[in-house]
Image (cartoon, rainbow, N blue to C red):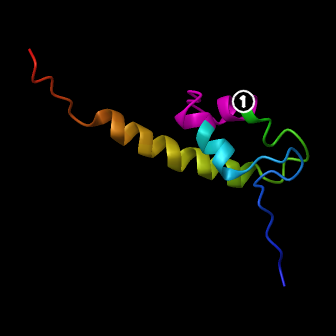
Amino acid sequence: MVSRSRFVCNCRCVSKSEILNAIRRKGAKSYLDVRTITSATTGCGRCKIEVDSIVDAELKKVKIADQQLKFDFWE
């Protein structure tokens, strides 16, 4: 039986929600930004692949949202 931790990065106790918060609220635009803000992957490094995939997926969502057309009907 495999036990799952509530943390993505066990060494630095960083959860998925903290990673998403770094992108959504703190303005992280890359894996390195997330690493700087959260300290994820700065311990043993075993979580790098998972953190990187979370960051990539979220940044794709943000990029798509930024590309949506915005109309200003008040002009």
Using the rendered view, name the quadrant where residue 69 is placed: top left
In this figure, which residue is indicated by the disc labeled 1?
37
Magenta-drawn stretch contains 33: yes
Using the rendered view, name the quadrant where residue 28 is placed: top right
Residue at (79%, 70%) from the top-left corner?
A: 4
Q: Residues within 10 Å of mark 1 (few under 14, many from 20)?
A: some
Magenta-drawn stretch contains 31: yes
Dominant secondary structure of the magenta stretch?
Answer: helix
Secondary structure of the residue carrying tag 1 is: helix
- Quadrant location, the C terminus: top left
Q: Position of residue 29 (x, y in %)?
A: 55, 30
**Which amino acid type is marked by label 1?**
Ile
Q: Position of residue 44 (x, y in %)?
A: 91, 47
Please state if 60 lies on the left or on the right of 49 as rendered. Answer: left
Magenta segment range? 22-36
Using the rendered view, name the quadrant where residue 41 is placed: top right
Residue at (50%, 41%) from the top-left corner?
A: 59
- Quadrant location, the N terminus: bottom right
Q: What is the tally of numbered marks visible in this picture?
A: 1
Residue at (40%, 37%) from the top-left corner?
A: 63
Please state if 10 lies on the left or on the right of 75 as rendered. Answer: right
Residue at (55%, 46%) from the top-left corner?
A: 56
**Nearest the camera: 2 or 15?**
15
Please state if 17 lies on the left or on the right of 11 as rendered. Answer: left
